[in-house]
Image (cartoon, rainbow, N blue to C red):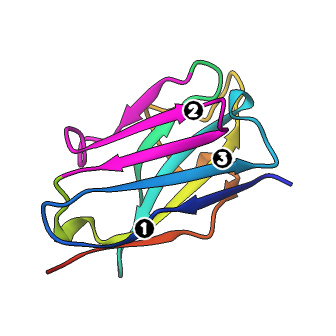
Amino acid sequence: QVQPVESGGGLVEPGGSLKLSCLASGFTLDYYAIGWFRQAPGKGREGVACIGGRDGRIYVTDSVKGRFTAARDNAKNTVYLQMNSLGPEDTAVYYCAAGPQSDYGPRPETCEPAEYDYWGQGTQVTVSL
């Protein structure tokens, strides 16, 4: 059963850092694209970073570029989201999602939630004093 499993959320002060992990349970990263998404209260779900399945190409959205980075460890079948210089605007539930990689998508450069089929339960990130 394809099931992304997130971990690593929590409470952090402004300016701090957190590292989220997404374990690819029941599937192999080589064949699935992975996306990190977040949803703040009262807002829609937005893409944060996406990684292609075949080539591991990484795309980070403009809203977090320079502060967030993503990485894939095939040996551990795990994807990471390193978040630095966190601010209150980063407070949200963060989701990891997977989609079977094909010639037609998912496309990392669009980081579109609708292209991903399997979603984790989410992990809360709260940035506050």
Q: Callout 2, which amino acid?
A: Asp
Relative to 38, say whether 91 is above or below.
below
Q: What range is drawn magenta here?
A: 56-84
**In magenta stretch: residue 66:** yes
Q: Callout 1, which amino acid?
A: Gly
Considering depth in this image, is 20 or 32 the residue closer to the camera?
20
Secondary structure type for disc 2:
strand
Which residue is tagged 3?
A: 98
Q: Is residue 9 left or right of residue 22?
A: left
For label 3, count other residues whose C-alpha is less than 10 Å away and answer few (under 14), some (14-19) or many (20+). many
Q: CA distance from mark 3 to mark 1?
A: 19 Å
Secondary structure type for disc 3:
strand
Residue 97 placed where, x, y %? 60, 52
Which residue is tagged 1?
A: 9
Which residue is tagged 2?
A: 73
**Reading the chain from its start, which is encountered first: label 3 or label 1?**
1
Q: Callout 3, which amino acid?
A: Ala
**Reading the chain from its start, which is encountered first: label 2 or label 1?**
1
Residue 103 placed where, x, y %? 69, 21
Q: Is residue 41 left or right of residue 33?
A: left
Residue 45 placed where, x, y %? 44, 64
Relative to 12, say whether 41 is above or below.
below
